[in-house]
Image (cartoon, grey):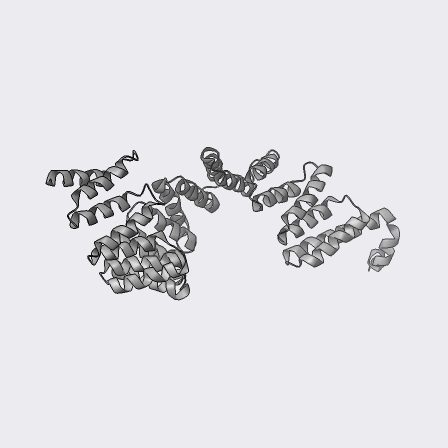
Amino acid sequence: MSDMDNINEEEIAKEKTPEELEQLKISELSKRGYQLLKEKLVAEAEDCFNQIIEIDVDNNYALVGLGDAARKRGKFKDAIIYYQKCLDLYELNNYALFGLADCYKALRKFNQAIKIWEQYLEHDSGNITVLTRVADAYRKVKDFKNSKEVYLKVLELEADNPYALIGLGHLHYDFKEFREALHYWERMVEVKPDSIDIRVLTSLGNCHRKLKSHESGLKYFQQALAIEPNNFYALFGLADCYRGLNRDKESLECWQKILKLDPYNKVILTRAGDSYRALEDFENAEIYYQKALNIEFDSYAILGLALVNKEKGNFVSAIESLQGLLKNDRKNHRLYTEIAECYLVLDQKQKAIDILEEFQKLGIRNVYVTNLMAKIKTAR
């Protein structure tokens, strides 16, 4: 056994200067503080960092650590103070820059977050995590060009990066470019067919809903429900696809499943009413429309009741309801055509023409209105 093996920790400590011991303590507290943060023991981590501050008030590790702790608590404004103090002292501290940008993002101050992240990228231009955050922030502020440019840069650095593929899908979806959105989300399915996120599946389904390719949408919503049987978005999407395919019985089954989980959802009550109306079960249609109205005024429920009255031959009541809706929805062409059709059944052709002309005076062109007007005038 060598002499070195006999030297204990106390003897080593005796050989160190007070300054060295101080730095050793700071190092140990810092390591322990960050480990506690990883373990989600935030209060204990803060205690470690505050002990460091008592020794060294401007310690960058402690300032960032306290910022991280505040951020984990959701106290973003407090976190900003710590990160900013660190950056005032250590301008290029990447951890403080990253944390500061994330705080601004959480506070939905996306333009400020972008500025901070771009400052970070000046020193670490290939950081994929930061690049995807920048692209996401550009998307939030509706900057299509810069968002797409940064997402594509991420894909150049890492082909099929899931965050970039998902982000590009959302970007194109937000700008109603549904086929392009499909391209990126379908790629996600190809890359990870066995571990696809349910949100990607519902997003793919929603693209097909928007494109009216309802049959294709069914597949994705069904896959999502196989993962999570009570997922609201998957049930809603499936019901809406069935509705688009005129499969009203199956659509109604989905609405009813949602209502078991959320019985006072006004929108779903109205959709269920629509399904009953399409199935010509007018009694239940009225019940569900009224349930929706008992929660809160709903123009779609009023419209549904008016259409039920129209189907039942109560044309005067239907007209009254539709006219009431027109007061707050002057540009809805369907209200005018439904009123006109009621007047035609009542053999009041001039009134039908008058209501359609009222719509045309708004300067809005609508094929159905134009065709109905031509049909009435030809019949005269």
Q: Position of residue 242 (x, y in %)?
A: 28, 56
| View extreme (bottom): residue | 260
Relative to 291, say whether 318 is above or below: above
Where does the image place residue 239, in percent across and percent down from the top left? Answer: 32, 57
Residue under the image location 21 percent in, 59 percent down: 312
Q: Residue at x 85, y 47 (%)?
A: 19
Res 122 quadrant in image: top right
Q: Residue at x 34, y 61 (%)?
A: 290
Q: Quadrant of the N terminus?
A: bottom right
- Does 363 sit above or below residue 237? above
Task: Please state which of residues 262 and 108 is positioned toward the viewer in this rendering.
Answer: 262
How many numbered tags mark residues here? 0
Residue 338, percent across and down? 24, 48
Q: Quadrant of residue 222?
A: bottom left
Q: Is residue 190 above or below residue 269?
A: above
Residue 133 appears left or right of 359:
right
